[in-house]
Image (tube, rainbow, N blue to C red):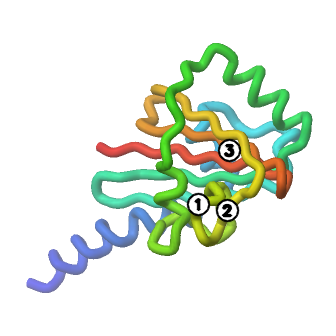
Amino acid sequence: MALPFFLLLAVSVGVPTLAILRPATSDFTEAFGWPPGPEFTNLRGETQAESDFRSIYLAFDGSPQARAALESKMAGAKEKHTTDFVDSLVDDEGTAPDWFKAGSELVSRRRCVNRKVREFDGWKDWDDFIVVDCLSDRHIYVLAASID
């Protein structure tokens, strides 16, 4: 009788945990649709998955090479109006990892003082795809999120 309960628990808790443990290159590939090249240095990634929500957080060095690669690969992508979605994830109650410092000056922690934010509409079927170029800490942060 207890076996079905433990199987259900393992599936509902274990699967998201496995996704979090994968390499950052896998997170990058899933988010962008291509594997990271050598221009994406000091890559960090984390996937968070729940029953109906999935998000991928990425960070890498904001080198001129990384910026050029993003511009080239995302040329023609449809941009949309910038929202405060990133701020809601990096505030004190947010779910973003501690290293994801993409918030605006309006949040108390994990913020970027000088940033350029671009939000894309329908990139690789993500509901939200946000690229934050943080000039003050020389990193690029990416959030890809979907609700099923």
Looking at the picture, how far across and down is residue 130, in whole percent? 58, 40
Read off the residue under disc 3. 132
Label 1 residue SS: loop
Residue at figure coordinates x 80%, y 52% from the top left: 139
How crowded pointer 3 is (Cα within 10 Å; few <14, some 14-19, many 20+) is rated as many
Q: Viewer-nearest of labels 2 and 3? A: 2
Q: Which residue is mark 1?
A: 106
Q: Quadrant of residue 35?
A: top right
Give me the C-alpha separation between circle 1 and circle 2.
8 Å
Using the image as rendered, state which of residue 81 and residue 20 is in the foreground: 81
73 is higher (above) or lower (below) than 76:
below
Q: Is residue 120 visible?
A: yes
Residue at (84% x, 45% y) in the render: 62
Type of the residue with mark 2:
Arg
Mark 3: amino acid:
Val
Which of the labelled discs sits on residue 111, or is there none? Answer: 2
Q: CA distance from mark 2 to mark 3?
A: 11 Å
What secondary structure is marked by label 2? loop
